[in-house]
Image (spheres, rainbow, N blue to C red):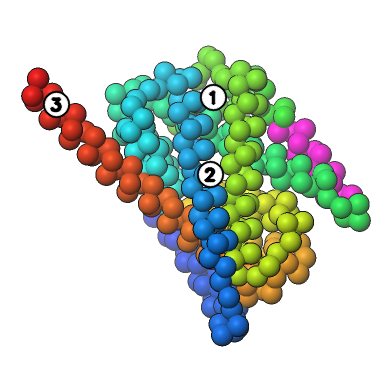
């Protein structure tokens, strides 16, 4: 049964990647590269926005982890956080947590797991909030059912963050894995504060795609909210696709469909190229931060070891 499930997931992954690869090749091949002009200033802005997103996420994690008694040096925590981010590229979505548990091996595994769970709930909720709010404030000529969907989603998300509901949800997941239930959960105010800060990260992600689009073809800032909503929706769907590591293929496929529906913000081949470049940019920034933090942590540990030897 496990082997059948594994091969089913692999089949879906290969199918999605194959379809997306063909779609990318078909559209990118239509670009007239002799007339294509890349604005490197916008590419630099996109890189800065991606860096800001990950640095903000790290700052939030440091604040959140202390609520659960998890504390280490700045260098050590940065190494654990940024390396663990690379775990999402392994199928199954659990490698990020396993890397966190290994990095914080001197702390309670239970607390690390719960803190990571709260981090995920807060970040996902913030992105859902953004999408819901943007659906509510669509132009007046937009279909009412879309706006009502946003209102319903907003109310459901606000309710789901209440400690009573949140504790039941967490305990249900813990029981599935045969773990003991928790007696306490983060306060309502604490969850709302973390969700609010994570919303800034959501807008930064949309800003990356907006800047990349502008690097290849001029796009009005008027479309930035819609681009952000489309990007975060694609990210959420990619996370739900457990067979795709890092949502690869799924996220891009959803954006290929969603962005042209917003408006003719750019020629379709340019949209496809922008989505692919955005994925590469985020991945390169993640790899850079993971490698850099590991090198700094290793150098710092070496210096600390020499000091202890001298004393």
Q: Residue at x 56, y 85 (%)?
A: 34
CA gap, disc 2 and disc 3: 35 Å
Dividing the picture into quadrants, the one containing residue 256 is bottom right
Label 3 CA crowd tier, 10 Å (few <14, some 14–19, many 20+): few
SS assignment for the magenta stretch, majority: helix
**Between marks 2 and 1, how big is the CA–CA gap?**
30 Å
As measured in the structure, the alpha-carbon distance from the residue carrying label 3 to the one carrying label 1 is 45 Å
For mark 2, what is the residue?
53
Q: Earlier in the sequence, mark 2 or mark 1?
A: 2
Q: Is residue 152 magenta?
A: yes
Res 12 visible:
no
At 59% from the left and 78% from the top, the residue drawn is: 36
Categorize mark 1 by other alpha carbons within 10 Å: few (<14), some (14-19), many (20+).
some
Give the label, 3 or 1, closer to the camera: 3
Looking at the image, residue 63 sits to the left or right of residue 197; the answer is left
Q: Position of residue 303 (x, y in %)?
A: 18, 33
Element on which disc 1 rests: helix
The vertical placement of 28 against 77, above or below, is below
Depth check: 263 or 159 in front?
Answer: 263
Label 2, secondary structure: give it.
helix
Residue 120 visible in the displayed image: yes
Q: Which numbered dot is residue 66? A: none
Q: Nearer the viewer, mark 2 or mark 3?
A: 3
Q: Residue at x 73, y 51 (%)?
A: 225
Residue that badge 3 annotates: 307
Residue 150 vs residue 10, the one in the foreground: 150
Residue at which label 1 appears: 171
**Left or right position of 232 against 47:** right
> Where residue 159 appears, x then y in whole percent?
72, 27
**As rendered, which of 155 and 180 lies closer to the eye?**
155
Q: Earlier in the sequence, mark 2 or mark 3?
A: 2
Per the rendered image, the range of residues in magenta is 143-157
């Amino acid at each position: 049964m496990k082997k059948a499930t594994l091969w089913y997931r692999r089949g879906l992954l290969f199918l999605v990647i194959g379809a997306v690869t063909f779609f990318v090749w078909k559209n990118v091949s239509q670009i007239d590269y002799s007339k294509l002009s890349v604005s490197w200033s916008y590419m630099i802005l996109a890189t800065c926005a991606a860096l800001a997103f990950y640095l903000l996420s790290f700052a939030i994690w440091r604040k959140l982890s202390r609520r659960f008694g998890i504390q280490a040096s700045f260098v050590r925590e940065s190494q654990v956080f940024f390396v663990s981010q690379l775990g999402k590229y392994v199928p199954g979505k659990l490698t990020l947590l396993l890397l966190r548990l290994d990095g914080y091996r001197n702390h309670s595994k239970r607390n690390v797991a719960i803190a990571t769970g709260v981090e995920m709930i807060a970040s996902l909720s913030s992105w859902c909030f953004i999408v819901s709010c943007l659906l509510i404030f669509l132009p007046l000529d937009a279909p009412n059912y879309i706006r009502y969907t946003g209102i319903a989603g907003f109310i459901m998300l606000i309710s789901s963050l209440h400690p009573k509901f949140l504790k039941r949800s967490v305990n249900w997941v813990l029981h599935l894995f045969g773990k003991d239930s928790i007696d306490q959960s983060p306060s309502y105010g604490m969850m709302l504060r973390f969700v609010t800060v994570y919303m800034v990260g959501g807008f930064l992600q949309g800003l990356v795609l907006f800047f990349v689009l502008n690097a290849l073809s001029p796009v009005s800032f008027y479309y930035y909210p819609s681009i952000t909503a489309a990007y975060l929706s694609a990210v959420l769907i990619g996370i739900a696709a457990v067979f795709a590591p890092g949502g690869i293929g799924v996220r891009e496929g959803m954006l290929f469909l969603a962005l042209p529906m917003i408006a003719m913000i750019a020629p379709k081949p340019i949209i496809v190229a922008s989505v692919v470049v955005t994925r590469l940019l985020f991945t390169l920034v993640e790899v850079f931060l993971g490698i850099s933090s590991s090198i700094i942590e290793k150098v710092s540990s070496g210096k600390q070891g020499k000091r202890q030897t001298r004393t």
